[in-house]
Amino acid sequence: MTVVPSGHQYEISHGDQRATIVEVGGGIRDYAVGTRDVLHPYALDAVCDGAHGAPLIPWPNRIADGRYRFDGVEHQLALTEPATGNAIHGLLRWRNWAAVEHVEHSVTMTTALNPMTGYPFLLEVSATYTLDDGGLTVRTTATNRGERTCPYAHGQHPYLSPGRGAIDACLLQITAGARITTDPDRGLPTGTTTVAESDHDFRRSRRLGATALDDGFTDLARDDDGRAWVRLTGGDGRTAAVWVDESFPVLQVYTAHTLADGRRRAGLAAEPMTAPANAFATGDRLIRLEPGESATTTWGCLLTG
């Protein structure tokens, strides 16, 4: 029997688009239009690496020392990035999710985050993945099913595909006017600065080259639909793009330069985030979910050209 580390595979399609959503972590294993990847995939027989396609709940990115205070109570999370002493990317990446509705073009995945050490709160989470003429849309809702207020933030970790080859030859556009500065050793925020006249200014599409990024971008410029964008144009002239609605004030962009050989710089992470790194500790844009209250976010990706 073949072992599939990501569990059951839920395939959806629309025209020549196809995507696979997985049981373990509830994320996107692949998304392509015809033979052209929109999101950089991981193999059916592989363990998800670099959080490829995964929902990041109840926080994205890092929490310093895995420690935070909420409503006067100290909490200690497991250090899931031990080399830097951080807790990273939430608590649901290795949980099983269940498909409660699955039709040809859409699947809704659900899971529960039960009270645990470091996060003694009860969340119910659903994510609906839908393919249509506008690409892949992801709508995520988290509901506080507990009896007390809980801290919450949400992100997801898709990697845009360059097509063939690495991302270095691609053109990159990020519709953001500011960057969150971080310390070089732990990736934790130290402030915010304009991208103007800097190596991080991708407001106009330009060649990425050997630039290494693992940065949060803010001051997002939005189109008439309220969407901010990250666009990656490959050598084939086609553009893979991620958009976020107004529930996401931060876009984390990561050039995958720290992944293993064969995966390094093979895709560009464009991560929608409702709050920046370390929000549980700083409170920066942290969501307070009252008992029975829900928070919903929407983002999507598509291929043009």
Image: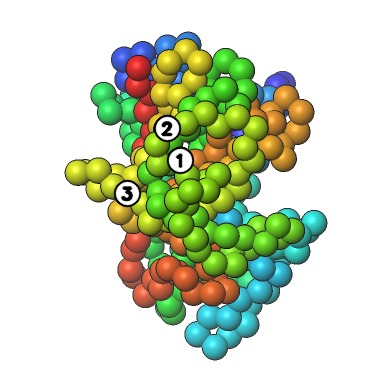
Residue underneath mark 1: 202
Mark 1 belongs to which amino acid? Phe
Count of marks overlaid on the render:
3
Point out the residue furthest to the front here: 197
Q: Nearer the viewer, mark 3 or mark 1?
A: 1
Q: Quadrant of residue 190?
A: bottom right
Note whether 3 is above or below 284 in the view shown: above
Q: CA distance from mark 3 to mark 1?
A: 12 Å
- Dot 3 crowding, Cα within 10 Å, few <14, some 14–19, many 20+: some
Can you see residue 49?
A: no
Point out the residue furthest to the right here: 83
Q: From the image, which quarter does the C terminus lie in? A: top left
Foreground of the two, 290 or 195: 195
Foreground of the two, 135 or 217: 217
- Name the side, left or right, on which 291 lies relative to 213: left
Foreground of the two, 147 or 39: 39
Foreground of the two, 95 or 180: 180
Residue underneath mark 2: 205
Residue underneath mark 3: 221
Q: CA distance from mark 2 to mark 1?
A: 6 Å
- Residue at 72 percent across and 40 percent down: it is 258
- Dot 2 crowding, Cα within 10 Å, few <14, some 14–19, many 20+: some
> Circle 2 — which element?
loop
Lower position in the chain sequence, tag 3 or tag 2: 2
Contact between marks 2 and 1 (CB within 8 A): the answer is: yes
Lower position in the chain sequence, tag 3 or tag 1: 1
Note whether 88 is above or below 236 in the view shown: below
- Percent of width and height locating residue 81: 73, 56
Mark 3 belongs to which amino acid? Ala
- Residue at 51 percent across and 38 percent down: it is 158
- Percent of width and height locating residue 257: 69, 37
Point out the residue furthest to the bottom here: 72
